[in-house]
Image (cartoon, grey):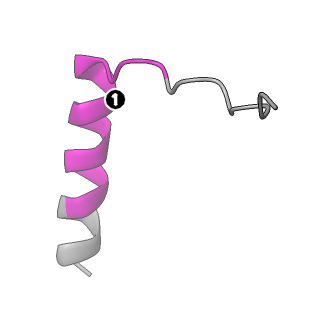
Amino acid sequence: QARNLPPPLPPVTDPDIALLKRLRDALEAL
């Protein structure tokens, strides 16, 4: 029986990585 697999995650783009870095820096600055 074939199970319904979740759709693959979209590739991470450079803007997403930059945003995550900014969020991490903001949290460290608190």
Q: Is residue 18 magenta?
A: yes
Work out whether residue 29 or residue 18 is closer to the camera in this orientation and state it: 18
Is 1 positioned to the left or the right of 18 in the image? right
Is 17 positioned to the left or the right of 7 in the image? left
Q: Position of residue 11 (x, y in %)?
A: 36, 18
Is 1 positioned to the left or the right of 10 in the image? right
Q: Residue furthest front?
A: 1
Q: Secondary structure at mark 1?
A: helix
Q: Residue at x 18, y 75 (%)?
A: 28
Does the image show residue 11? yes
Q: Position of residue 14 (x, y in %)?
A: 22, 19
Q: Which residues are magenta?
A: 10-24
Work out whether residue 11 or residue 27 is closer to the camera in this orientation and state it: 11
Work out whether residue 10 or residue 4 is closer to the camera in this orientation and state it: 4
Q: Residue at x 33, y 24 (%)?
A: 12
Q: Quadrant of the N terminus?
A: top right
Q: Position of residue 23 (x, y in %)?
A: 31, 55
Badge 1 amino acid: Asp
Q: Is residue 2 magenta?
A: no
What is the quadrant of residue 6 in the picture? top right
Is 9 positioned to the left or the right of 16 in the image? right
Q: Quadrant of the C terminus?
A: bottom left
Per the image, the residue denoted by label 1 is 16
Q: Residue at x 28, y 72 (%)?
A: 27
Up/down of 8 relative to 25, above or below: above
Magenta segment main secondary structure: helix
Up/down of 16 relative to 11, above or below: below
Does the image show residue 29? no
Q: Position of residue 18 (x, y in %)?
A: 21, 33
